[in-house]
Amino acid sequence: MVTMTLLRRLFFPIFLIFLCTFVQPAHGFYTWTDEKGVRHFSDTPPATEDLDRLQVRDTDGTTFEPQGAEPQSTPQRHFLWSVETNKNTIYLLGSLHVLTKDSYPLAEAIENAYHHCQKVAFETDIDGLNNPIMQAKIMTLGLYPLDQTLRQHVSEKTYAALEKKVAEAGLSMAVFERLKPWACGVTLTIMALERLGFDLRYGIDTTFFQRAKKDGKERIFLEPVEYQINLLANMGKQDQELSLRQTLEDLEVVETMAPDMLRAWKTGNVDRLDAIMKATLKKYPDIHDRLLVQRNLKWLSQIEHLMNQDDNVLIIVGAAHLVGAQSVVALLRGKGHNVTQR
């Protein structure tokens, strides 16, 4: 039976829909199968002397020639931006909602931004998930009724693929029988990331949420918890199954792509993360618009309101919200604000 603790983790703010869909290959990444039949996925070509005969396929199936690794940009940048106004400074920090313990200590620029701010804004109230009423709602939205099972709501092909992945993870299908498809996908993703050393406890937003609480800084929430939960739970039946099937495919390359995303975040490589997100979301334009673009647009007015206050504010949102043509950063620049990556 699914525990309350597990279900609460499923709904931790929209983190795995976009910050853990990184397992979809992006253009310019290499995927190949070695002589032992093991599939590899990387942003650099395999270590082989016979690169001339190696065929590397892009995500659309196009074969292209391997190229060397992209050189690191200098000077060092971070997933941190600042906007100087006549009254205050606004910082935008891209969060990886799950992170490894050895990612700490954080860069000095990030720590300085936190200490420079009197207020910290988050996507939602993380403590709000502990509210008994919210827990009851999570249970209702994440589970089928007692007389229904997952198998009744997905195709045999999808169910068989899920069974295979669950068995590979050493789990029992009993854990998943009453979970809805999107909740299954989130659960498997969390577990896969945890096996790689990623943990919600080390996520950027969790870390600074607890620090701001301890330090007595004012915390601001861009969205109610209910809003985020409904964004996930209100997906249609077909979209839920497609999302689960995509997740099952993506998990095949999670062991190589998770470190790639972490490296992009640590080095402030905006282009790399943007490429990953574009490859992941190109099959789901409606979901991209609903869960990223529309939310960015709604946040814009809130951020501009904070610019008119006297206090400095650190705004922490998922890193995917800060890359691309319709990102928060791009929208602010489009309105004439000088947004500088730190």
Image: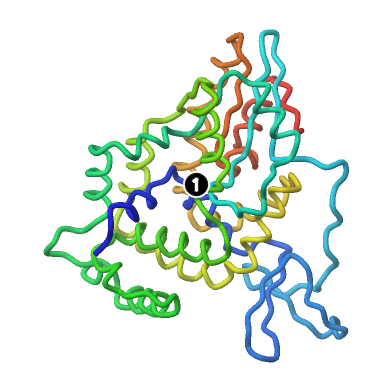
- Determine whether the residue tagged by mark 1 lies in a helix, strand or loop: helix
Residue 151 against residue 108 in the figure, above or below: below
Horizontal arrangement in the rendering, residue 209 relative to residue 243 (left or right)? right
Q: Tell me residue 314's x, y (percent).
A: 61, 26
Residue 111 against residue 146 in the figure, above or below: above
For mark 1, does the 10 Å Cα neighbourhood hold few (<14), some (14 to 19), or many (20 or more) residues?
some
Horizontal arrangement in the rendering, residue 233 relative to residue 324 (left or right)? left
Q: Quadrant of residue 32?
A: bottom right
Q: Tell me residue 31's x, y (percent).
A: 68, 74
- Looking at the image, which is closer to me, 141 or 324? 141
Residue linked to disc 1: 288
Residue 245 against residue 17 in the figure, above or below: below
Q: Tell me residue 91's x, y (percent).
A: 66, 26
Residue furthest front in the image: 214
Q: Quadrant of the N terminus?
A: bottom left
Seen at 39% across and 79% down, the residue is: 167
- Looking at the image, which is closer to me, 52 or 316? 316
Q: Quadrant of the C terminus?
A: top right
Seen at 30% across and 74% down, the residue is: 173
